[in-house]
Amino acid sequence: MPHLKAIFYDMDGTLTHFLIDYILARKRAIEELEHQGIPNTKDMFSPNNPSRVTLTLARKYMKDNLKFTEERIRWVLDKVHERIVEVEREAALRAIKVDEMEELLQFGKRQNFKQIVCTFNTHEVAVTTLKKAGLFHYFDAIYGRDDVKHPKPHRNHLEIPAKRFGFSPDETLLIGDMQFDIQAARNFGCISIGIRTNFEINTIENADYIVDQHHASKKIIQIIQSCFQI
């Protein structure tokens, strides 16, 4: 039975309640693209799609149809990113912790596990969120989407902190409430625990273990004790 050395945590929906108006963020992204001269031809961009999908489509359109240089494409996408971050910052200032997770964080601290946040928020927004929610002091490191070349679900988001702190996939686990959290764990090769919430796009069916948000800490601690040598 392996020793547990580290726990990866998603942030929104896992450690803090999901307060980001993601539809507004997607609309702001589309508005900025149109402002920068990228037409929403045949409704190519939709607020029903994740922002990363919109940005991928926009990049392709700018390169193939508008013949923008790579420098101009990056400039436009940076402007779009700024609009998205505005919405995320606003949510960070209203952050509320998920009380059901704090017992687990305290347990991890007592056991000297490395506790690492891997979030699709920016590093700045993640720090603001965790400080506002009163959880910042529990963590050894925070990795936002701007701290890694390939964010979740790519394994790179977990590999970078693993290399920094010197642990392997079988010595860690990941806790999250979205499918790309679970897929990131699978791609990295560690155990995944999905948190079931009432959020409409909460999809965790492929997780190794699934727990309800209510009393999540106790259930996760039991899973840890059954899977690892403590």
Image: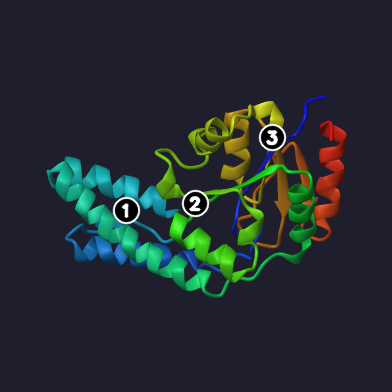
What amino acid does circle 2 point to? Phe
Q: Amino acid at mark 3?
A: Thr
Residue 107 location (% of width, % of height):
80, 51
Q: Quadrant of residue 34?
A: bottom left
For label 2, count other residues whose C-alpha is less than 10 Å away and answer few (under 14), some (14-19) or many (20+): many
| Relative to 71, 96 lies left or right | right
Give me the disc on residue 120: 2
Q: Position of residue 60 (x, y in %)?
A: 25, 42
Mark 1 burial class by Cα count in 10 Å: few <14, some 14-19, many 20+: few
In the visual, does 28 lie left or right of 115? left
First in sequence: mark 2 vs mark 1: 1
Residue at image coords 48%, 56%: 121
Q: Residue at x 42, y 65 (%)?
A: 25
Which residue corresponds to mark 3? 172
- Residue at the extreme top of the image, as rendered: 1
Q: Residue at x 42, y 61 (%)?
A: 47
What amino acid type is highlighted by mark number 1? Met
Nearer to me, 209 or 157: 157
Q: Which residue is painted at 71% across and 46% down in the image? A: 194
Instruction: Please name which of the two marks, 3 or 2, marks the residue nearer to the observer.
Output: 3
Q: Secondary structure at mark 1?
A: loop
Q: Which residue is mark 1?
A: 44
Q: CA distance from mark 3 to mark 2?
A: 20 Å
